[in-house]
Amino acid sequence: MTSRTTDTLDHAMARSRGLDTLLRDLTDRAVVQVPGATACSVTVRRADRLMTLAGSSGLPGGLDLRQYENGSGPCVDAAETGSAQYAPDLAAESRWPAYTEYALATGVRCVLALPLAVEGETGAALNLYGLEPDSLAAALDAARAFAERAAEAVNEALRIERQQASAADVRTALLSRGVIDQAVGMLMARERIDAHRAMERLRRASQDRNVKLRDLCAGLVDRASGGASRGGQ
């Protein structure tokens, strides 16, 4: 990996405002920095199915989707087996007949799919496409180096994304706890009961009305305060 490639990927990661933005940037950079590549995409397994999280400009529509539908193709094999898949000329390829026919119709003749070591995911791949037979042959080392660095960037973005999601969950939980406590206190004062009985009444009402406990409590607090509490949530 050249220092230039490392620097550009670091800059892409630093500028990224999320995983989607980072991946779009990475796929566009792959086309620029891997000789012979005219399009690039990133495949990741999420919710027990493979999907394309990002594709470079110029990526033929449906090129990856056709593989997922058939459960067969270089991207699928790279993601599921963890082994690189190289098809120097799809016109002479016999491993994925249904996919090959479709890819050739889009003008793609050469495909290189490299597995990505992505933490917390069961399969991922960087997919590179060329329009000429064996157009990626001279770029195999550069493509592998790019894929390794891309995996590092994706893992860092995923780590940040998980931290942000965790922080948001904590904030939501704290907000929920606060409004529930207010509703319990109101019920205790109004009905002259203890906290345990007040919570049980609120839970029963939540179940009977098929309304989330926090939403039920927020409604009670809102009505008692003339709607001011919701504006502060």
Image (cartoon, grey):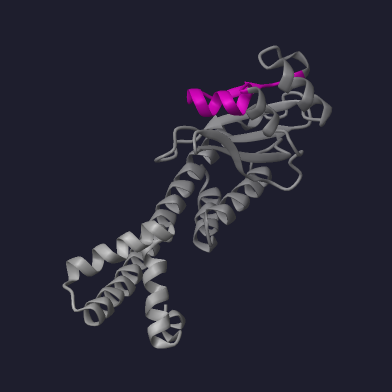
Q: Is residue 125 visible?
A: no
Q: Is residue 162 visible?
A: yes
In the rendering, at what x and y percent does residue 20 appear?
Answer: 57, 53
In the rendering, at what x and y percent does residue 38 appear?
Answer: 73, 39
- Does residue 13 lie above or below 89 as drawn? below
- Does residue 128 lie above or below 22 as drawn? above
Please tell me how many numbered marks the rendered image carries: 0
Is residue 63 highlighted in magenta? no
- Does residue 109 lie above or below 191 as drawn? above
In the rendering, at what x and y percent does residue 3 appear?
Answer: 51, 50
* Most foreground residue, 44 or 145: 44
Residue at 40% over, 68% down: 216
* Most foreground residue, 168 or 231: 231
Q: Which residues are magenta?
A: 71-90
Left or right, residue 23 beside residue 135: left
In the rendering, at what x and y percent does residue 48 appear?
Answer: 49, 33
Residue at 38% over, 76% down: 220
* Most foreground residue, 39 or 98: 98
Pick out the residue farthest to the left: 194
Assign the C terminus to one quadrant of the image: bottom left
Q: Quadrant of residue 65?
A: top right
* Most foreground residue, 222 or 40: 222
Residue at 18% over, 66% down: 196
Is residue 84 highlighted in magenta? yes
Residue at 42% over, 81% down: 222
